[in-house]
Structures are given as C-alpha cells and as structure tokens.
Amino acid sequence: MSLRLFFILFNLLQLPVYIVAMWLSFDKHLWIFYTAELLFVANILFSIVFYRKVLVPLEVLSGALDMLKAQDWNVQLRRTGQPEADALVDVFNGMMRKLHNQRLLLREEQHFLSMLVAEAPIGVVVCDFDGKIIIANEAAGNLAGAVAGEHLPRLLAEIKPGTDMTMRRDHAHSLRCSRRSFIREGVPHEFFIIENTTEIIASAEREAYAKIIRLMAHEVNNTVAGLLTALDTLDLSGDEAELIASCRKRAMELVDFIRRYAELVKTPAPILKPMDSSAPVIGCRRFLESMCSSRNIKLDIEIADTAIVQADETLLSQVLVNIVKNACESIRSDGRIVIRVDGRNISVTDNGKGISPEKQACIFTPFFTDKPGGQGIGLMFVSEVLKGHACSFSLATDDNGLTSFHIKF
C-alpha cells in the first residue's frame, strides 16, 4: 500500500467519528456539536498541511530514486518549500550534476580514445577474458597481415604475457609486439601493441655498417699504403722480384675489395626526374642480353603498359643490372629470365634454384650472402636505391619454383 493511499484511508476512517458525534449532540449538547465541527475542520486543514509538508517531499524523493534506477542524469528535482526536504533536493541535484558531467566527460574521453586508436599508425588489439579479439584497429590488421597473412590471432599467440617480441618475417617488415593486460569491471583483459620498426632497424643497420666500413677502409688503406711504400724501397731480382710483384698485386686487390664496400656507403641520392617506367629496361637492354647470352640464358622483355614516374634512370639501370646478374648466377646456365613492365610495376622473374624460406628473411640483411666468395653488397645496393625512390619491393620464390623481384613505384 502506498503512503498516499494509507493517508487517504486514515482520514476517511476519522470521518464517521465526527459525523456520529455531531449527530448525537445536535439537539442536546450544542457545544459538543460545535466542538466536533471545529475539530473536523481543523483535521481537514491539518491533513492538507501535513500532505504538503511531508507527503509531497516524500513523493519527490521517491521520484528521485526512480530516476537513479533509470540512470537518467539529465533531470533536476524541484524545491518543495520544506527546508528539510529542500536540503535533500539540493544534495540530490548537485549529485546529479556531477554524475552528468562525469558521464559526459567519460563519453568524450572514450570517443577521443576510440578515434586515437582508429587513426594511430601503430596497431592496437584488445581481447576479452576468453582471449577473443573485441577491438582491432586498421593498422593492426595491415601490419599483421603484411607479416603473417590474415592470421592475426596466430601472430599474437606467439607473444608471452607481459613481454615484448620483435618479429622479422621478411626484408620489408619488422614488427615489435607488446602484450600487456588491464582490469575492466574487475576482469583482466589483454591488449597488444604492434609497431612497425622496419625503418628504425634499417636505419640502425645502415649506420652500423657504415661505421664498420669506414673503419675498415681507413685501417686497410693506411696499412696497404705503408706496405706499398716499404715494397717500393726493395731492389730485388729473380724469384724475390716476382714475390714482391705478387704481394703488390694482392695489396691492390685488397684496396679494390674495400673500395667497393666504401662506395656502397657513398651511394648517391637519386636525382628524381619524370621518365617512362620502361626507360631503364630499354636503356640497358643490350647489356643485359650480353650478360645472359654468355650463359645461354634467354632474356625476354615484356612491356604491357607504361607510366610516368619520378626516378633516377642511371641508378635504376644499375639496379636492374644487379638483379639480372643475381638471376643469372641462380640459373647458372640454360634458363630464362623475363623482365616485365606494367605501368608502375617492374618485375624480373627467373627459373633458377630459388630462395629457401630460411633465407627469405635475410636476403636484404647487410653483408648476407650464400654465394661462395660473395660479399653481400649487391642486394644492399639495390635496397638502398629503391628505398631512395620510395619504392616498395620484394624478392620471393612462388609455388611454381619461379623467383620474382617485384618493384612498385
């Protein structure tokens, strides 16, 4: 039973008492009749005052509880004119304003964080209690997809909780992945940060091998210069003279050997000019054919379409020479190389021995080589020039055994 209904029934139950008292005293005791009548009027007035002073504020506070249950923070209670009730109303309205402002602030922060996560260049992945991905921004899918296909959960499963892992699946993608956790509604959730560190690692590698090469060149040149000076002072004949000549030749070969490394460090920046994407291929076609003919390798050039690109023709021609030279060495003899130009894409495909999955991630690493007597600087030069052109590139062997070097401007 509600308080209002109880109050009405209470007043209605008093009404027969007053009626009976006035009816019995109307003829015999008029003073009782008038007294009962005054009490009846006073009771009505008191009930009205009581209703306004007590029941109305209680109904207002009851409505406040309903608003709290409904989580409606945008309303305010009206003052009732009752000091005690108005004090509660003021406290309630102040609390509602704070809740409204805090909820608005929380929504704004959530919106900002959502936009930040969505637009961030680093990958962000959030999982629920069961490890199911509930949030994954576009960068996470792009970075992980470039490294591990479309298997983002499999990539994240390789990381131990609370640790960081650097993954390098090929020459063009190095990722640093961090696995952390946070508490939400009393339940631990995990999140992952995926950062592309390819350029950072490449820059560190370039700086490291540049310092090593400069140091090697300095020490070798100084040593050889002193050795040659000492050999020039000797006046020998016969077998001794031949020995001195052999030492001099070997010293000059060593100087030439270290000079090639030093030239790699000094790779000139490309001078970009508008040109046809087929120009480097056509310009060095005769030279490339001569490289292949000596090994009985057939060279086919296919120009499906062309486009105007910003490039340095001289450097790109040297890149093609290096790529075709590697293809010839892979084939050895009696094979086929196809150079294809299709708009902004250039590819060199050969049917050589191919690249094993173990070597795939290392082929563009500085000084890496699997050739006897190789120095590992050919693909380093190619990589430096193509990065200077802001080209994307890849080198891989497909399921058919064909190895392709793809360049895209």
Image (cartoon, helix red, strand yellow):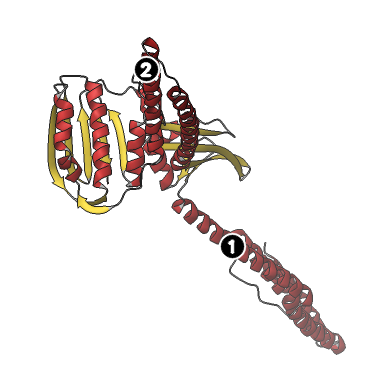
Q: Is residue 344 visible?
A: yes
> Which residue: 15% across, 19% down?
334
Residue 206 percent coordinates (x, y): 45, 38
Helix, strand or loop status at disc 1: helix
Query: Residue 112, how many percent across, how many down?
Result: 52, 58
Mark number for residue 364?
A: none
Describe residue 124's horizontal placement relative to residue 11 as left or right: left
Q: Quadrant of the N terminus?
A: bottom right
Residues at circles 1 and 2 in contact by the CB criterion of under 8 Å: no
Select label 1 or label 2 by which is in front: 2
Q: Picture quarter containing residue 174?
A: top left
> In this rendering, would 170 be left or right of 45?
left
Relative side of 407 to 110, left or right: left
- Please name the residue that numbered disc 2 is placed on: 246
**Amino acid type assigned to the residue bearing label 1 in the image:** Leu
Asked if 260 appears above or below 139 in the picture, the reply is: above
In which quadrant of the rendered view does residue 404 lie? top left
Residue at (23, 40) in percent of width and height? 317
Identity of the residue drawn at 58% across and 33% down? 163
Q: Amino acid at mark 2?
A: Ser
Is residue 362 shown to the viewer in this render? no
Distance from disc 1 to disc 2, alpha carbons, whole Å, reads: 82 Å
Crowd band around label 2 with a 10 angstrom C-alpha radius: few (<14), some (14–19), many (20+): few
Q: Is residue 121 above or below residue 152?
A: below
Where does the image place residue 195, in percent across and percent down from the top left? 48, 42
Q: Which residue is mark 1?
A: 105
Looking at the rendered structure, the secondary structure element under dot 2 is helix
Residue 302 rendering spot, x and y as whole percentages = 12, 38
Relative depth, front residue between 231 and 149: 231
Going from N to C along the chain, the mark reached first, 1 or 2, is: 1
Figure quadrant of residue 291: top left
Which residue is more in the foreground, 127 or 349?
349
